[in-house]
Amino acid sequence: MKLNRSEVVFHPLSGVEARAHLFWWRGGLYRAIRNEHISFYEHLLSTGIIRNLVRRKLLVETEATDLELDGYGLVLKHQTVPFVSYCYEWCGEMLKAAALSVLELETELLNDGVALVDLKPHNVLFVGTTPVWVDLGALCPLSDWESIGQPYETFSAYFTRPLKIMAAGHSRIARCLLRDGNPGIEQREVQAIAGTESDEVIGTAKAGAKKIIPSPLHPFVRRVAQHLAHSLSSEAVPEPINIVKRAARDIEKICLVQPLRECSVHNGRAVFPDFTSTVDWTDKRRSILSVLSAKKPGSVLDTGSDRGWYAQLAARNGARVISVGLNEAAVARLFSDAVAKALPILPLIIDLRKINTLTAMTDAPSLTPAQRLRCDMVLALGPIQHLAFTASHFNLMVSHLSAFARKWLVIEFVARDDPHVEGWPDVRSSGYALDTLLALLTKEFKTIELFPSDSEKNRILLCER
């Protein structure tokens, strides 16, 4: 079938690819292969290389089509990944999982005479907690490997070095540097931030060795050292597979600081109660379960979720979940929980208060937060007391949150005398009232239903478009 160019929407970041061009057509995501590279990709398809990588969840689902597009001899169809996230929104555990997945993919490809270029986390998306390589245009014949440049230097700049900075306790700095873009993170930056060994330390070690080794042996030791250095420099460049194995060992050795476990009980109530019984649940939790059971959203955005009890509840009730929060330890814990329990949750480090819903978070053309994080239902069960305390702030908060809600917004109103909010500035303002919030919500949603929360004056509001 011949495609009409007027119906095709090319991806804004895909035009620079030498081998392929990504585009949307009738709601589907496709990749057009340039004529000179058709035989290579047909080989990947016919030999089952792509099928095997997809089966192992290392590569985005891809299949051949009978579509035709002017200038391209082959059109492939990709699975559409539910949510787009960026590496500077991931916790350290997610970046490490992505790194190991990329190296596993590279190992499999090298065994089949294929290699990866552009080894950056920007080419990885998470399907739930599973990192998947999405850039099929970054695959090339192994015979082209020498012309690639230094792909594993790129891997170090975008994976290994940021992880070392995170392991030293500076995750926020690492994420800021990743967001900064090219050229990734340099070794000197790791040394400056994480305090790794420098030339001065190495020099001190050499000076110490001179004191230990007797003087008469110094010329002999110097000749041996020079011979070894010459031998190493004259060796051939290590095989790609050996470089990948070494990179994998480096990543495995990086030990990220694990978050502490929180107490299990607060004021006589379970902070993170079990999901198998509602006996220890609060009224708020029972209300949210009732809403999820009645509406059955296909996707849920849980805002300010901390460790993500409500995110896990939504996932257990059949929803694909994005959970956003600021506490990296809590995000990392939620990621670990989701991996262990095979829950379809994508936990991200994002401050929704500080992003423009209609502006992309990168300098290049990209998806806006409202586009990539929009879900059937938004849960706002905590940030209200942090987002707004006056009528004008209410207005901003409602418009902000509703931009992410395709069908429903579930928001908790916390009364002004609640101990969690009574000390906040402007909380006693006349604008801070349930009636004010309801009046604003009715401008965005057709119906609003109230449910009980943990306090007699607090309410859960189910807003439906």
Image (tube, rainbow, N blue to C red):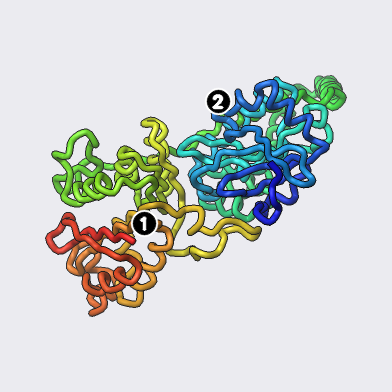
In the image, residue 193 lies at what x, y percent?
A: 59, 49
Callout 1 amino acid? Lys
Mark 2 or 1: the one toward you = 1
Q: Is residue 242 above or below residue 369?
A: above
Q: Is residue 126 visible?
A: yes
User: Dot 2 corresponds to which residue?
Assistant: 56
Q: Earlier in the sequence, mark 2 or mark 1?
A: 2
- Measure how far apart labels 2 and 1 are at the Cα level: 34 Å
Q: Is residue 169 left or right of residue 71?
A: left
Q: Is residue 5 left or right of residue 367?
A: right
Crowd tier of the residue under label 2, counting other residues whose Cα lies within 10 Å: few below 14, some 14–19, many 20 or above:
few
Residue of label 1: 407
Q: Nearer the viewer, residue 295 or 229?
A: 295
In terms of image quadrants, where is residue 264? top left
Q: Dot 1 surroundings within 10 Å: few (below 14), some, or many (20 or more)? A: some
Q: Secondary structure at mark 1?
A: strand
Q: Nearer the viewer, residue 368 or 363?
A: 368
